[in-house]
Image (tube, rainbow, N blue to C red):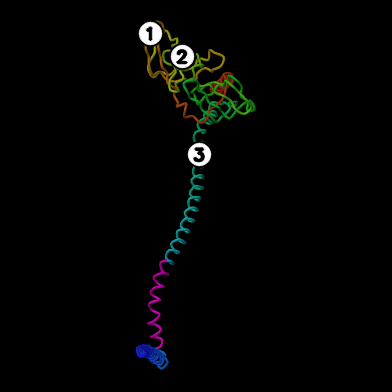
Amino acid sequence: MKKRFSRKINKNNFFKIIIILFSIILIYKIITQKRSGLENFISNVSYPFLVVCNKIVKPLEAAALRKKNYAQLLSDNIILREDNEKLLQENIELKSLINFDEKSKDLLDFKKRYALENVVFANIILKNISHAEQYFLINKGKNHGIEKDMVAIYKFQIIGKISDVSKWHSKITLITDKKNKISAYSNKTHSNGIVEGSNDINKLNFSFVSHLSELELEDFVISSGKGLVYPEGFCLGKITNIEKQDLYYKVNVEPLVKIEELENCLITSQEIINDSFQSLNTVNQS
């Protein structure tokens, strides 16, 4: 038993001696090698670690760079979007100014041409066009000289009449509203009747025209000025349909302008129009 144990100890000692000798030889080789050899050895030993580190670090660096680039692109995109919105807003404002100038210039030229000095230029700020009621609200009221029963016109087209007035704004009941009734006649045949609203923005009724009268399609229907509100000589529309019935014609009239598309109008009165046209006739005769 003792012999077996002693043999085992001897074998262990033998391996330890071999390892020590190998280590001494290896250390000696390293020490006795030239500098370049040592560098090559270190390089060979460290190369696997460098490869592993490179494979780990590079993707991390690329991901960080992508994140930085994405953040920069996102920031640039926000700045560009803000700049684009500012430019779009400026463009809209410029177009609105040009559009307003173009639309209002016609009315102001009309006002100047016919010497309508006391006529008020107004912007339409609200439109209500329904089967129950049809009216506009304008940005002029009592403080601007607007009074009830004054007339709203667009060039030679009557739009409606002022039905309600406050300090800063007024309500125009449109000629297409059922409550509006205007004494009128056909331009070519001088057939008399009453133009009534139908609560249809594109249609008026030319009522109480005798079946003995003559009418023509496409003829203009003109205000006669026989009432106390609407002046004479302004257009209400053109005849689009004629049906002969027992005592009266059934006649449809279409306004000359797209009333629902108007952005502004002129506010005047029968008295102002009559005075202006009288002055204009005097100037023309002289």
Residue stretch in magenta: 38-59
Q: Residues within 10 Å of mark 3 (few under 14, many from 20)?
A: few
Label at residue 245: 1
Q: Secondary structure at mark 3?
A: helix
Mark 3 and mark 2: span between their CA atoms? 39 Å
Q: Amino acid at mark 3?
A: Ser
Q: Earlier in the sequence, mark 1 or mark 2?
A: 2
Q: Categorize mark 1 by other alpha carbons within 10 Å: few (<14), some (14-19), many (20+).
A: few
| 241 shown above or below 260 | above
Residue 238 falls left or right of residue 286: left
Residue 99: horizontal and vertical position, in percent? 49, 37
Is residue 194 part of the magenta span, yes or no? no
Q: Is residue 208 depicted above or below 176 in this figure?
A: above
**Residue, x 47% and y 13% (percent of image)?**
194
Which mark is first along the chain, 2 or 3? Answer: 3
Residue holding disc 2 = 185
